[in-house]
Amino acid sequence: MTPFEIFFDLVFVFALTRIMALVGRPPTPAAMAQGLLLLVLLWFAWSSYTWLGNQTRADVGLVRAGFLVAMAALFVAALAMPQAWSSGPGLDGPLLVALAYVLLRMVHLALYHWAAGSVPGLRARIRFFAAVSAVGWVPLLLGALLAGAAHTTLWVVAFVIEIGGQRLSYAWRGAWPLRGASHFSERHGLVLIIALGESLVAAGVGAGSAVIAPPVLGVALLGLTVTVCLWWLYFEHASPAAARALAEAAGHRRDHIAADAYSQTHLLLIIGVIYLALGVEQVLDHVAHAHDAPDRTLSWSAAVALYGGAAVYLAGRLLFRRLSGQVVRPEQATVAVVVLLLLPLGQALPPAAALGVLAAVLVAAVVADRLARAPRGHGPETGPSGAVAR
């Protein structure tokens, strides 16, 4: 992994922050759904460039020039995302987002086709994938010219075609070939930890100028506790074990771990982090302005972002473990279900208490995870593929 790729990842995470701006303060159900659609499209583009960087060096020659063009397109799309469903002064927001995304994808496909000459059959698969993607760009551009339900529906159709084209390509010849296992796992871990960092930024935004008030500081520390728990649940054991499984696998098995456990499942982790960050931001905003409405609770949208984001993250972690050959214990799945079941309580409680309950559940999950790995006097447990559970 090169510093240039890290730079590209920072632009991607900037785009995630712009999605948070689109969802708004406070979030609404429609804006949350729109943000989710854009987040999926962004992840699809970022993941494509991660595969490209794994196939060839991203920081030299023609590929670096292409990455810079893609970076500019991603940056423009990010700037325009808060206006992705509305028009304002200047250029048309939806059309600007759609055109930037199409340019981002075109550059990737052209560079991947150029770099794939040494892999038999890969260029034919890329041409097939490009043809399907081009079909998906038609509803994307048409939707940008329309408004309301037609706009959203056509963009959903574009997303389905893009993802469907990728899965068809996998079904035809298998997943994309992976060259460097450590590079691939490190890129995904890095973008996740940067996204976790953005959840701390969201806490600062929610607290505003009241951040030095003792109640706000206390709740901010609860938000930090939640973030630390998410970090621990992924990076302490799940991530190293998956990286080892990816490095030790061979042939199609390794390609499928990369495609499924990393490219697909990490989308759930990113979604969980971003929406949880929105929820934490709302909690701190309520606490910082408690003198205006002391009895106010979180809206349902904010509670869904807080508890639903945590549940999606936990579910994504379990799927990541499963697809990388690690053991998924019943108590680990139970935690994700418990968080989801506590959502109505999170909406009914005062915002600080709602965050406190979530933090307590996540701390309990970390403790249970740690105790489950304590020495028991017998051999290592293995997952469904025979991999040692770490």
Image (cartoon, rainbow, N blue to C red):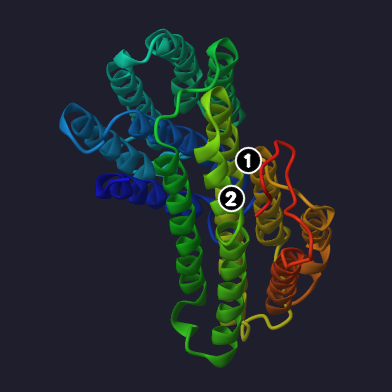
Q: Are marks 2 and 1 in contact (CB under 8 Å)?
A: yes
Q: Quadrant of the C terminus?
A: bottom right
Circle number at residue 227: none
Secondary element at tag 1: loop
Q: Nearer the viewer, residue 46 or 19?
A: 46
Amino acid at pointer 1: Ser
Amino acid at pointer 2: Ala
User: Which residue reaches farthest bottom?
Assistant: 214
Circle number at residue 324: 1
User: Which residue reaches farthest front?
Assistant: 378
Instruction: Answer with the quarter of the image where residue 292 lies.
Output: bottom right
Instruction: Answer with the quarter of the image where residue 71 lies.
Output: top left
Q: In the image, 131: left or right of 273?
A: left
Mark 1 Cα within 10 Å, few/some/many (few <14, many 20+)? many
Q: CA distance from mark 2 to mark 1?
A: 8 Å
**Residue 82 visible, this orientation:** no
Q: Quadrant of the N terminus?
A: top left
Counting from the top left corner in percent of width and height, residue 372 is at 76, 64
Q: In the image, 72: left or right of 308?
A: left
Q: Nearer the viewer, residue 91 or 348?
A: 348
Disc with the residue nearer the chain's start (2 vs 1): 2
Q: Which residue is mark 2?
A: 241
Counting from the top left corner in percent of width and height, residue 100 is at 34, 31
Residue at image coords 68%, 78%? 352
Residue at image coords 51%, 77%? 207
Residue at image coords 56%, 10%? 172
Q: Is residue 310 above or below residue 181?
A: below
Counting from the top left corner in percent of width and height, residue 323 is at 66, 38
